[in-house]
C-alpha cells in the first residue's frame, strides 16, 4: 500500500476555499523559461496562491520540468520529503509526512500536487527554528560550511544596503515595536535563510528550478536573487512578486498585484501587550 492510500480519507479537505481567481498577468514572464524562477507570496493571500499555481501549471503543462524548492519545508527534513515523493500519490500525503505546523498547507496543495503529477523534484529550502536560533545567537556564517562562507563572503560584514533594507523590513513587519536589541539577530536569520535558499537553488543546476517563498525572500535587491548574483551571475534569474501593493520599487523583475486579503490587524495583539 502506498502512503497516498492511507491519506485518501483526507482528500475532501484538499481544495482551498474562496472564489476562483482570474488568470495571472500575461507579462509576468517572457516567452522563455528562466534557469531560476523566484515566485513570491503574501503567505495568507488566497488569490496570490491561486494565481502563482496557475502560472506554474501553465508552464509545466507546456513541457517545463523544473525542480521546485519550497521555503515551507525545512531543509533537514529532505529525507522525509524524498520518502513522501516516492510513496505518496497525493499532496495531502506529502503534507502529512513532511510538512510542519507553521503553514496553512492547503494553500500549497496545488503546487505539491503538480510536482507529484509531473514527477518534479520537491526540495526543502528553509532553516529550522533551531538553525535560525543559532544564527541569531552566533551570526550568519554559523550555519554554513567553510566553502560557502568563502563563496558568499560571510567572513566580512553584510553589505550595508542589504543590512539596512532588511532592518527596515523586519522592524516594519513587527509593527515598529521590536526591541532594538533583537533586530540584528533577526536580520542575520533572514539573511541566512536567503543564502541557504540561493545555495540550494544553485545545487539543482543544471536543471531549471522554481523557488516558492515569501516576497521578502524572492527580492532581487536584497533577497535570494541578490545572493545568487553574487556567486552565479551567469544564471538567468527571474523574480516575480505577488503583493497587495503595486509598488515594485526595483524589488522584482515583475509584480502581480493582488486584492488585499481580509484579515485581522496583525499588530493588534502586539499593541495589547505594550
Image: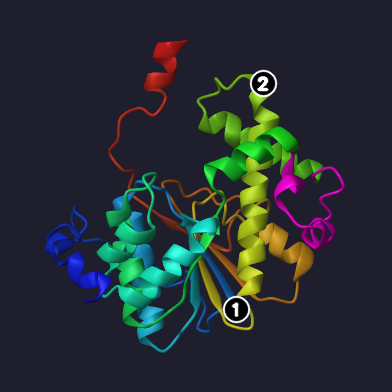
Residue at the (67%, 55%) spot, across then down: 195
Kind of element beneath mark 2: helix
Q: Position of residue 77 (x, y in %)?
A: 49, 59
Q: CA distance from mark 2 to mark 1?
A: 39 Å
Asked whether, in this view, residue 258 is left or right of residue 65, the answer is left
Where does label 1 land, which residue?
35
Q: Label 1's element?
A: loop
Q: Residue at x 63, y 35 (%)?
A: 186
Q: Residue at x 66, y 35 (%)?
A: 136
Q: Which residue is mark 2?
A: 180
* Label 2 vs 1, first from the N-terminus: 1
Question: At which x and y percent is residue 245?
Answer: 45, 46
Residues drawn in magenta: 139-158
Q: Which mark is residue 140?
A: none
Q: Which scheme is used to colour this image of the protein? A: rainbow
Lateral position of residue 1 relative to residue 238, left or right = left
Amino acid at each position: 500500500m502506498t502512503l497516498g492510500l492511507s491519506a485518501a480519507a483526507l482528500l475532501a479537505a484538499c481544495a482551498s476555499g474562496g472564489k476562483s481567481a482570474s488568470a495571472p498577468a500575461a507579462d509576468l514572464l517572457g516567452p522563455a523559461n528562466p534557469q531560476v524562477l523566484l515566485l513570491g507570496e503574501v503567505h495568507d493571500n488566497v488569490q496570490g496562491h491561486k494565481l502563482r499555481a496557475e502560472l506554474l501549471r501553465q508552464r509545466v503543462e507546456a513541457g517545463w520540468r523544473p525542480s521546485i524548492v519550497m521555503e515551507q519545508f525545512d531543509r533537514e527534513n529532505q529525507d522525509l520529503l524524498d520518502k513522501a515523493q516516492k510513496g505518496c500519490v497525493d499532496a495531502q500525503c506529502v503534507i502529512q509526512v513532511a510538512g510542519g505546523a507553521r503553514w496553512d498547507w492547503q494553500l500549497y496543495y496545488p503546487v505539491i500536487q503538480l510536482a507529484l503529477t509531473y514527477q518534479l523534484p520537491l526540495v526543502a529550502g528553509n532553516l529550522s527554528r533551531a538553525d535560525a536560533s543559532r544564527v541569531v545567537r552566533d551570526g550568519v556564517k554559523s550555519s554554513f560550511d567553510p566553502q560557502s562562507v568563502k563563496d558568499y563572503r560571510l567572513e566580512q560584514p553584510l553589505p550595508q544596503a542589504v543590512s539596512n533594507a532588511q532592518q527596515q523590513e523586519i522592524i516594519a513587519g513587527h509593527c515598529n515595536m521590536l526591541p532594538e536589541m533583537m533586530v540584528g539577530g533577526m536580520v542575520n536569520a533572514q539573511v541566512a535563510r536567503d543564502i541557504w535558499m540561493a545555495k540550494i537553488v544553485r545545487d539543482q543546476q543544471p536543471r531549471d528550478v522554481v523557488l516558492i517563498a515569501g516576497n521578502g525572500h524572492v527580492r532581487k535587491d536584497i533577497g535570494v536573487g541578490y545572493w545568487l548574483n553574487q556567486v552565479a551571475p551567469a544564471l538567468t534569474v527571474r523574480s516575480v512578486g505577488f503583493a497587495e501593493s503595486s509598488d515594485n520599487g526595483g524589488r522584482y523583475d515583475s509584480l502581480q498585484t493582488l486584492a488585499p486579503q481580509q484579515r485581522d490587524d496583525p499588530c493588534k495583539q502586539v499593541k495589547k501587550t505594550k
